[in-house]
Amino acid sequence: MTLTILKDGVPQTLAAAKGENLLNILRTQGYDINSVCSGNGSCGKCKVHFLTTPPPLSRVEQRMLSPQEISEGMRLACRVALEGDCTVEIPSDSGMAIAGAGVEKRENGDGRCFAAVDIGTTTLVAALVDASGSVLATKGEKNRQAAFGADVISRVKHIHTGGLGELQRTVAAQIDSMLLGLLKEFPAARLESTTVSGNTAMLNIFFNEDCSGLGFAPYTPAFLSSRRASAASLGLSVGGDVVSVAGMASFAGGDITAGIVALPAQDDGLAMLIDLGTNAEIALYGRGKIWCTSAAAGPAFEGASIRQGMGAVNGAVCSFELVNGNPRVRTIGNKPAMGICGSGLIDLVAGLFTAGWIDSSGTLKRTGASPLIRINGRRASYVVAGEEESIGGRPIILSETDIGNLMRAKAAIYSAASLLLKQADLHFGDLEKFYVAGGFGRFLNLENAVSIGLLPDIPADKFSYVGNASLSGTRLCLLSGESRKTRAELSARMTYIDLSSFPGYMDQYTAALFLPHTELHHFPTVVRKMGR
């Protein structure tokens, strides 16, 4: 039997066996398919559109898909066992807004160039750099390893079942394609070398090293030091050697090292860098010292652990406010609503909490509140956008489960940052600068992030959004001898704080789970957005 796959208008036809799982086929072929739960049927995000007669519905699909989606031939790839010749279309999210991508193409001088690549859990960003250090062009894409799970732990579990080679080939093929695409714009370019950064697991996987030890105590990686290998040995066709930025600890990888390299030195004062992602990495540095930790925030900010969550793509609810009790929703690209991205999620919780429609524990008010709060048995949800404002014939809903996932994520980050300061006998007020990195930070409403207890209530002018600091630092490490020296010295100056064994962390985390009732001292009336 034959299976035809259509993505962005490009068809691929291949042979398939009867009974073969559609999600497994799409993974094997390297397609960008959203499979947050790694195919166990619990997330409802691996949607595909059957252009031929769709297969019978499973019970999971009956629950996860709207009547309109079902009638239009939408199915969940993880629930489909192929029965005959068919054609499926993969919905595109190529409009994802990725930090660090999209620099205008520049002219190349002598033809020599270098590549810097940030291997994020959620996204990949590659930059082509000339010999002077100027960025020629960049490209960003969603990391196709997401088909094997949204977070690091899901992918480490896949390695436990023999999936290391599959994960490595997936990311290597994607990086190769991105670099070839960039080089195509410069026919005379000669790629000398590639430098990569990323969290410890992502770098271990890319260098085809078994990092399954990260899945259980004492969380041992395959390596932390800088690695060098030929591009060909890693499955790249672009030539030259590939060098990684050294990491600091099992959950503080080369990305946070590169991020510190990219930011201004703090000789007298102190700064904090938070890279908001699936595994939020936090560094406190200055006065010749570095303290570092990581918080397992989960993929809430990328929308993965939110029922109707999504990345920052066209149609994602990215902003929300209540005006005289009436909701005002904005989507990326001003398109009909498809789901909720990280910034929209924060705005929603902040707005509903300020209006008194949810309490400090994240419970929606059952009586005397907004008519947009719907009660279904013991569960409640808020209607963000109705059927007429949305795609697919179903409303966009924020459930109490979604709110709880956000609260756990923000509590993990805030408590980790607080204890990092405590270890250094400092407070948030002692910081000169507070840097926020990561893709979704560019849409972040600063006041709302502070009001829900994600970020500290400090003067607004201390905050700076620095985009993809990991890519910026990787680019500096690529060419600058001084930056390479700085990078090599960072590990010697670093104190890593393991929160899992830190006294009092669980008490601090539990306290941070609740939404704060205190008035903001530095954000009384003005709504501020970062990265604008």
Image: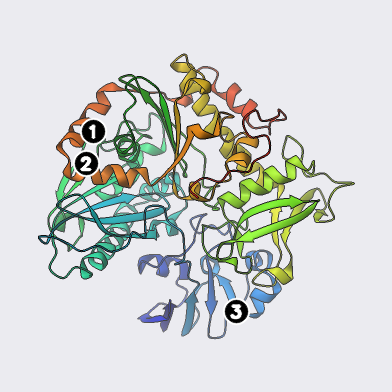
- Residues under numbered marks 1 and 2 in contact, where contact means CB atoms less than 8 Å apart: yes
Name the element at disc 2.
Answer: helix
Distance, label 3 to label 1, CA atoms, is: 52 Å
225 left or right of 156 in image: left
Up-down: is 245 above or below 341? above
Task: Give percent across and percent down for residue 128.
Answer: 23, 57
Secondary structure at badge 3 equals loop
Give the residue displayed 64% in from the left and 59% down from the top.
330
Would residue 498 be found to the left or right of residue 266 on screen?
Answer: right
How many neighbours does mark 1 have within 10 angstroms: few (below 14), some (14-19), or many (20 or more)? many
Q: Amino acid at mark 1?
A: Arg
The mark lying in front, picked from 3 and 1, is 1
Q: Relative to 400, say whether 337 is above or below.
A: below
Q: Residues within 10 Å of mark 2 (few under 14, many from 20)?
A: many
| Badge 1 element | helix
| Mark-to-mark CA distance, 3 and 2 | 49 Å
Render colour scheme: rainbow
Q: Residue 482 falls in which quadrant of the image?
A: top left
Residue position marked by numbered label 3 in the rendering: 73
For label 2, the residue is 477
Residue 308 place in picture, x, y as percent: 62, 58
Q: Amino acid at mark 2?
A: Cys
